[in-house]
Image (spheres, rainbow, N blue to C red):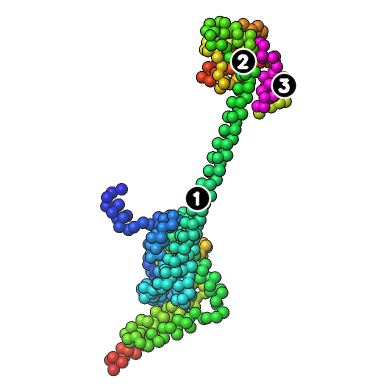
Amino acid sequence: MTAAMKLVMNASGPTDTELIRRLLDGDKEAFAELYRRRHGNIYRFALHMTGRPEMADDVAQETFMVLMNKSAAYDETKGAVNSFLLGIARNQVLSRLRQERPTVPVDEHYEEVDRSALMRTHLSSFAKKEKINAVRKAILSLPEHYREVVILCELQEVSYAETAHILNCAVGTVRSRLHRARAILAEKLEPARDESSTSDALRSTRCFA
Amino acid sequence: MNCQTFSELASDIARDQMMDAAARAQALAHARDCSICAAWMNAQQHLTADLREFVSASRDQTASTVVWENLSAAFDTRAVSYITTSRRRRIYAAGAIAAMLILTFAVVGLVRQRQSTNVKGSIAATFTRLPPSQTNSESREKNIIIEVKKKAQVTPHRHSVARQGLTLEVNQPKEIATDFIPLTYGDTEVGSDAQVVRVELPRSAMASFGLPVNMDRADQRVKADVLLGADGLARAIRFVQ
């Protein structure tokens, strides 16, 4: 190994697997580093799946609690640490959604939260925010098995193979679910896009008027 | 390429996924010819752009600081309980090892004590010490033979040992032994630490001690008891049948 390669490796720090090994020895710094690296992905996965920030917090916390107590269960030959954590988070999300489904419709919650914020934003960013909100709502309205594929493959940029490992299904199933989910999303977002382009057209008409 | 095949590839093209170059070229060519597929491709490309925008907008969303505070506290609690448990286990292990050592030393001490008592008894029963004035080895040999003949009965060795309390099996078949024959080398004086060791020798070895040997059975082995002094040297031997 050349000195340059060593330098690069040192600069990039220990791998997730090395951190897991250190965590097994009770190294809190390793746990903190793993949290720092991975908690964003886990939180966002939970947030996009549930649409509720407080539930996403709970899921992130519970996922890392599982990692803390059952890190010996991680097998590096079966996949990356990120996939391992996303698998745990998915189980947490699905069990919570099943428990709390009858109480809160998730997309309404987002609408309420964002509407007041949207009112205060500048007009130029309004359309962008509206589009983002539309995408968020469209994702949340997908059935769970499509939603999780979209979140993993599109938003988290996880490969088909890793997604298949996380969801415990075949790669072909991931591909077909993603294809179907994208079709549904495109259909849902089409009116919003038309509306947006109409408002753009109106704005430009107004400008020329 | 037909529309069905195109729709299967359109997502990957819109997502800029790695794919077969020829298939990609065919799909794009099909989209130029088919207006429905072109609209589909357009919608997919818009969707990809929307999703990417959504990703960049939500990139900064992270868990609240309370989550890490809770996890950190939980880790510390877990570490304390882990240390306590491991320390307790270490104490138990050390105690178990100490108990084992004490037990082992006690058993070894007891066995040694009993062995020395028995050897002393058997030696006392078999041999008497020669007076120090006698220095001639031949006369000492004679004396030993005389004493051995007087003391050592033609009784089974093991039985005599068993009577004296050694932990040997009692239900052994009866053995017949010759008298102890002093060996020509070494001192005939036997200390209190002397031991009798059971060995097997070729039957022909009996001839070297002046005993009759059936040459037909010369290749067979015969048992013998060797009397060892405290220095480990053989003092006397007897043959056992």
Q: Residue at x 41, y 81 (%)?
A: A133
Q: Quadrant of residue A41?
A: bottom left
Amino acid type at circle 1 is Arg
Residue for badge 1: B90
SS of the residue under disc 3: loop
Disc 2 crowd rating (10 Å Cα; few below 14, some 14-19, many 20+) is many
The label shown at residue B26 is none
The quarter of the image holding the C terminus of chain B is top right
Indicate the position of residue A16 as horizontal and vertical percent values.
Answer: 40, 58
Q: Nearer the viewer, residue B81 or B187?
A: B187
The three-letter code of the residue at mark 2 reads Phe
Badge 3 and badge 1 in a common chain:
yes
The residue located at (41%, 60%) in the rendering is A28
Chain of the residue where label 2 is placed in the rendered structure: B
Q: Give the label, 3 or 2, closer to the camera.
A: 2
Asked whether, in this view, residue B154 is left or right of residue A45, the answer is right
Quick one: SS at disc 1? helix
| Disc 3 crowd, CA 10 A, few/some/many (<14, 14-19, 20+) | few
Marks 2, 1 in one chain: yes
Residue under numbered circle 2: B127
Mark 3 vs mark 1, CA separation in Å: 52 Å
**What span is in magenta?**
B149-166
In the rendered structure, are the residues bearing label 2 and label 1 in contact, judged by CB atoms less than 8 Å apart? no
Chain letter of the residue carrying label 1: B
Reply yes or no: does residue B156 show up in magenta: yes
- Quarter-wise, where is residue B154 in the image? top right
Q: Residue drawn at (48%, 74%), measured in percent from left and top?
A: A55
Residue B7 in percent (x, y) is at 45, 70
Pointer 3 residue: B173
- State left or right for residue A137 relative to residue B137: left
- Work out whether mark 3 precedes mark 1 in sequence or the reverse, and give the earlier one: 1
